Image: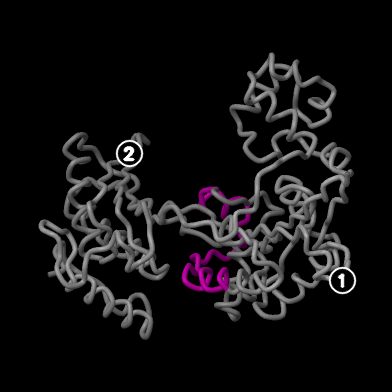
Amino acid sequence: MHAPASRRILLADADAFYVAVARLVDPEGAGKARLLIVGGSAERRGVVTSASYEARAYGVHSAMPTGRAQRLCPGATVVPVPWEACTAKSREIGAVLRRFTPVVEQASSDEFYLDLTGTEQLYEGAPLETTARRMRDAVLAETSLALSIGGGSSKLVAKLAASLAKPRPGGATAGVLIVAPGGEADFMGQFALADIPLVGPRFQERLARFGLRTVPDVVRHERATLIGWFGEREGAWLYDRVRGIDGAAVEADREIKSLSRDETFATDLDDDDSLAAKLLALADRASADVRQAGLVARTVTVKVRDADFITRQASRTLPEAVQSDHAVYAVARALLTRLRAARRVPARLLGVALSQLGPAGGSGQLSLLEPAAGAVETERDRTISRVIDEVREKFGRDALSRGGADPR
């Protein structure tokens, strides 16, 4: 009886994706800035989405308030995230990678898992590293974006390997790192437990109580010991992960679960009309994202973070799926009214999320001929949204906007 073949999993991770795209979009501005921060402005209490490797050397990292990032790296140039260009480039990367294998799972806008198990004959027995470098070269040639690719027998090992393949200031860029079958345990021995995905701050605190901070700290203990300390689920999970064992499958064409837009305000807002205007813009952007993805949504959620950092949200699931600006805003406005009535304090952040997504034109969407009784979306709503999309595509996102609470 033959032993089962080891899985061949890759993670392709675009290098400083948002920074790279910002430089492509604005070669004369962001393209010439060695110290570059991409994200919201400090004046609007924005946060860092990404930073160039040179800026990261100053301690700048994603999710950091932009104001703090500028204090750490005072010479940096700050530019907004070019969202539309990032979406387009993400699609381009995915299209190139799918030429190598159909089993591609897009984990985020700049991360793609690939399963090449059983493709040895297709690539004439070439080592996995050789195939990974061919992918990297193809993506660079066709998108002008560089990838770091990690590989191994599991998604966990591939992700950690990709992190080590990343370029580092002052060092050579490896680009590709493949962990050979059987080498998982030795490979994992160099990591802290905090480096393992899903080992968050709270779990780290619990681990530290038992003197566990690195992978070798855990490996010396038996499975039964870990289960005794952390319970059956977490103990067994930890025992496997520190050995690079992860049976999670690469899910080809994993469906998008939700799309959202939010904004943190430069100053807290307490005026209902001002909040409604912000909500209108966010609802329009979220619904445009849904239409661009060829989807419709059944659930609308509004999130409010109050000035005292208490976060609240309200949702409504509709009997029929929607995608128009008018329908999404109408539902979102009612939800915001409910949230404001429950607690009327200044708001720091406002967000709109659309979920329970499905393909446009599917059974969950309104009939184009005869709207259901009490429907929140009509064919006129959808037509208006399509016209707005066409104008924005031709003249830019700011070419056309709705100025009032009721677009009719």
Identify the residue under disc 2.
307
Dot label at residue 124? 1
N-term-proximal mark, 1 vs 2: 1
- Mark 2 nearby-residue class (10 Å; few <14, some 14–19, many ≥20): some
- Mark 1 nearby-residue class (10 Å; few <14, some 14–19, many ≥20): few
Mark 2 secondary-structure assignment: loop
Mark 1 secondary-structure assignment: loop
Which region shows up in magenta?
64-91
Q: Residue at x 19, y 69 (%)?
A: 403
Q: Residue at x 85, y 23 (%)?
A: 220
Residue 129 on the magenta span:
no
Q: Residue 324 placed where, x, y %?
A: 26, 66
Task: Give the quarter of the figure containing the N terminus.
Answer: top right
- Number of dots carrying numbers: 2
Q: Quadrant of residue 222?
A: top right
Question: Is residue 185 shown left or right of residue 87?
Answer: right
Residue 33 position (above or below residue 217):
below
Query: Is label 1 in contact with label 2 (beta carbons under 8 Å)?
Result: no
| Dot 1 amino acid type | Glu
Residue 89 on the magenta span:
yes
Q: Residue 257 placed where, x, y %?
A: 44, 52
